[in-house]
Amino acid sequence: MTRVRSALFVPGDRPERLPKALASGADAVIVDLEDAVEPGAKDAARAAVAASLRGCADGAVVVRINAVRTAWFDEDIALCAASPAVAAVMLPKAESAADVARAAAAARPVWPLIESARGVLALEAIAGAPGVGRLVFGSLDFALDLDLDPVSVAGRAVLDDVRHRMLLHARAADLPAPLDGVHPQLDDTDGLRAEAARARGAGMGGMLCVHPRQVAAINEAFSPSEAELAGARRVVLAAAGQRGAFRLDGKMVDAPVLARARRTMEAAGEP
């Protein structure tokens, strides 16, 4: 899973939804054993997930396990280690490199969820820990931890600060761009598109989502538009045979501009 624009959650206690999720077009499907499952149903959900994964292709899903400091963590890790269908382990409430090390015992890439003040303050250690595949922002849980209003101007400013820190630490650790949190309003497609465009503009690599109907909008937002792709092709074509910076359509094209154009083409699957 090198490029993840959309990552769709499936409740661990509803494994019958997994085939639909896998056919949704999401770049990653996350089977959720944490928030989606009530405490009394954890063991039954884990058993049901294990059974459903036996019918999945290798590396088909990510599993969000329960946090390190819970009674279910060890058995969740054992499930992930035993199933070839598990591509990565999403670790909630990640707050230290030691947390990551415990999750890495599954021998799968770890996706730490940053969703607390402690997690933000430990970002450098978490991002640099062996076994980390990508960082993920649990924005709603983070807002709850700090008791802030995530839709207020002030609350959004705090959340943006965390996004910026995650971007910097991910880049410094040579990780893919982080995944942003969910847009919880299921019927607000315009709002989802706006949030996804904003996240992409800020450098995030994709978003979590909670319903298949959100997948297409997110994939579109995190993919180059036809206009962007046409502009990138024009820059790359014009650069052939040029030495150093040159002028194109009244603008200077130098090495960073050319590199961005090539990156845009790569994101669209073009050489």
Image (cartoon, grey):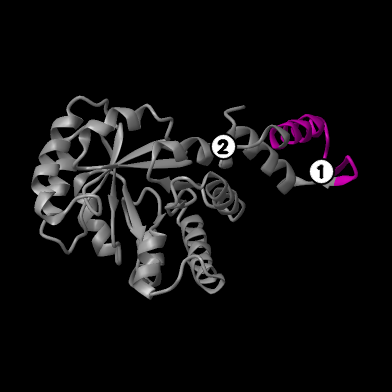
- Judging by the rendered image, the residue that carries numbered circle 1 is 244
- Judging by the rendered image, the residue that carries numbered circle 2 is 220
Say whether disc 2 or disc 1 marks the residue closer to the N-terminus: 2
Q: Residue at x 59, y 31 (%)?
A: 268
Where does residue 191 sit, x and y in percent of width and height?
A: 55, 50
Viewed as shown, does residue 202 lie left or right of 57?
right
* Relative vertical location of residue 174 with respect to residue 152 in this rendering, above or below: above
Q: Residue at x 20, y 46 (%)?
A: 106
Q: Residues within 10 Å of mark 1 (few under 14, many from 20)?
A: few
Magenta-colored span: 228-251
In which quadrant is the C terminus drawn? Answer: top right
Q: Amino acid at mark 1?
A: Gly
Label 1: which secondary element: loop
Q: Is any part of residue 4 visible from this angle?
A: no
Viewed as shown, does residue 26 lie left or right of 71?
right
Where does residue 246 sit, x and y in percent of width and height?
A: 86, 42
Q: Is residue 234 magenta?
A: yes
Q: Residues within 10 Å of mark 2 (few under 14, many from 20)?
A: some
Label 2: which secondary element: helix
Front in this rendered view, residue 15 or 268: 15
Q: How many marks?
A: 2
* Relative vertical location of residue 154 with respect to residue 237 in this rendering, above or below: below
Q: Residue at x 71, y 48 (%)?
A: 256
Where does residue 168 sit, x and y in percent of width and height?
A: 52, 61
Where does residue 94 sit, x and y in percent of width and height?
A: 30, 62
Viewed as shown, does residue 10 lie left or right of 13?
right
Q: Nearer the viewer, mark 2 or mark 1?
A: 2
Q: Amino acid at mark 2?
A: Glu
Q: Is residue 42 magenta?
A: no
